Amino acid sequence: MGNMKNDKTFVNPSVTSMDQYAPYVDALEELTVKVILSSPTGICSSEIELALDGQPMQALRERVPISTLKNSGAFFTHHTLSDKLIEPIIADIKEGIPVKDPACGTGNLLLACARHLPIMSDINDTVTAWGNQLYGHDIHPEFIRATKIRLLLLAIERGAKGPIPDTDISEFFPHIQESDYLVDPSLSKVNCIVVNPPYSIVQAPAQCSWASGIISNASLFMEKCVTTSDPNTKIVALLPDVLRTGSRYSKWREMISKHAIIESIKIIGQFDKLTDIDVFLLRMTAMALPNKKTNDHWWNLNEKAALPKKVVKDYFNVNVGPVVPHRDPDKGTWYPFIHAKILTPWDTVNIDTKFKKKRYPVTTFKPPFMVVRRTSRPGDKYRATGTIITGKKRVYVENHLIVIKPISGKVSDCKQLLSYLKSDAVNKWLDKRIRCRHLTVGAVKNIPWIKS
Ligand SMILES: C[S@@+](CC[C@H](N)C(=O)[O-])C[C@H]1O[C@@H](n2cnc3c(N)ncnc32)[C@H](O)[C@@H]1O
């Protein structure tokens, strides 16, 4: 089998190197050679199974520092999740529609697709047919090489027979290439896209119309997908949950729904045992013309009919506590200062009694109001743990608290909402609405609630 190490059609010098991964890819190639040369009985099938399953990710974790993986967003999708992701396009794959993974890593999603492709009369025909249908990009040449080797191994494992032509393996699967999708998304146009993009954190480009500062690379990838795909391209994506629910991605959601019809959203939970990030599946179809009616309410997309008539923001003003003690200067008027550690959960406290005074140059709040702790994760006993603040003095509120102030000015409204926040209904709704580790103002504002 030819050497793939020279398959460098694109070089991006800013990319973190995956050199340490090359020896593992060499071992994959040796295994494939062994499989091709040995009689069927001489092959250890468990070795092949591992190479086609989670072994590439395990080898990556063992060889490459976690900081490099995070910079590159190199976390590969396990078998079960890959199968789930491609489910909506299986019929298209079987029909011969070209499929692209714009960030293919070592090919887990392309392998999931290839499991539905036919086996031809020999290996050569099989790999040629698969090569006409499968497209992929990745910035790391080691991953591209691993993807091609694994696809070849899969064809053999699925029963493709015969000798392999004496060609360089880099020539198989010609549409799977080392390239930067964000720079050259239209290297090839296809009708189906499967993607688990890098979740690395990057600076929003200067021309970005929906965000500034630090953002998830996944959001840029999806923008590229919807803005550069042909109309009617089906897109299935596995994305970090913050894109579905985070208030800072609200404009991003609007931008996406301007360019694509959002077909369905499925909450998945934690990506895998070792990667503590919640993800969701997004299925959409690119559109020919921008959609005028956009939607950023992705958390209740599948339940429009059941939308409640009233939500918390109809009765309360909701804000995040503005004080960041180590950052804010010691200036301003002296008032009591509250933070999560000094407040008893589910209690009502009178601010005029025992609270230490501080001064900060930020907004203060006049009781009555309620605060809920922002730190909260799915599965917690209570997702929105609250305390009611009464009294006459204005109050400084720390940044880990969300302030919920009744528009009516009545403590009774706070009491009514506090008891509702303890309920299972709220826990379940928030578990679905926001899977990040912090509650957002947007999530609290939209908790369905009708005051009695
Ligand atoms: C989350 S992994 C997903 C890999 C594979 N699709 C899977 O699901 O197992 C994201 C991949 O994107 C690649 N990547 C990062 N930036 C890229 C870019 N600008 N263009 C193409 N690929 C990129 C990384 O090297 C990594 O392999």
Image: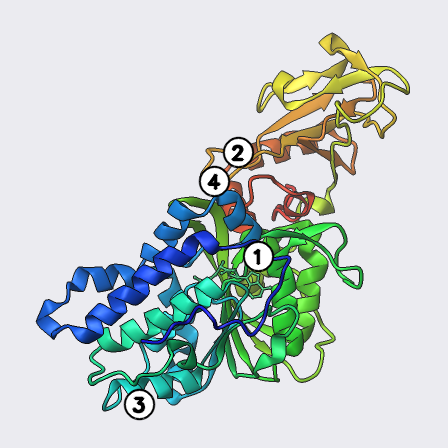
Residue underneath mark 1: 299
- Calculate the distance from the C-alpha at mark 2 to the C-alpha at mark 3: 62 Å
Mark sitting on residue 424: 4
First in sequence, mark 2 or 1: give its number. Answer: 1
Q: Nearer the viewer, residue 97 or 385?
A: 97
- Local packing at callout 1 (Cα closer than 10 Å; few below 14, some 14-19, many 20+) is some
- Calculate the distance from the C-alpha at mark 3 to the C-alpha at mark 1: 45 Å
- Calculate the distance from the C-alpha at mark 4 to the C-alpha at mark 2: 7 Å
Q: Is residue 342 left or right of residue 398?
A: left
Residue at coordinates 75% horizontally, 50% vertically from top-left?
A: 213
Task: Indicate the quadrant containing the N terminus: top left, top right, bottom left or bottom right.
Answer: bottom left
Residue type (three-letter) at the residue carrying disc 3: Asp
- The vertical placement of 221 against 376, above or below, is below
- Calculate the distance from the C-alpha at mark 4 to the C-alpha at mark 1: 18 Å
Residue type (three-letter) at the residue carrying disc 2: Lys
- Local packing at callout 3 (Cα closer than 10 Å; few below 14, some 14-19, many 20+) is some
Q: Is residue 414 left or right of residue 83?
A: right
In the current view of this chain or complex, which residue is farthest to the top? 354
- Calculate the distance from the C-alpha at mark 2 to the C-alpha at mark 1: 21 Å
- Residue at mark 1: C-beta within 8 A of ligand 1: no
- Local packing at callout 2 (Cα closer than 10 Å; few below 14, some 14-19, many 20+) is some
Tag 4 and tag 2, C-beta contact below 8 Å? no
Q: Nearer the viewer, residue 242 or 138?
A: 138
- Residue at mark 4: C-beta within 8 A of ligand 1: no
Residue 86 screen position, x and y as percent: 41, 71
- Give the SS element for disc 2: loop
First in sequence, mark 2 or 3: give its number. Answer: 3
Residue 374 screen position, x and y as percent: 62, 34
Disc number lying in front (2 or 3)? 3
Mark sitting on residue 125: 3
Residue 280 screen position, x and y as percent: 49, 58
- Give the SS element for disc 3: helix
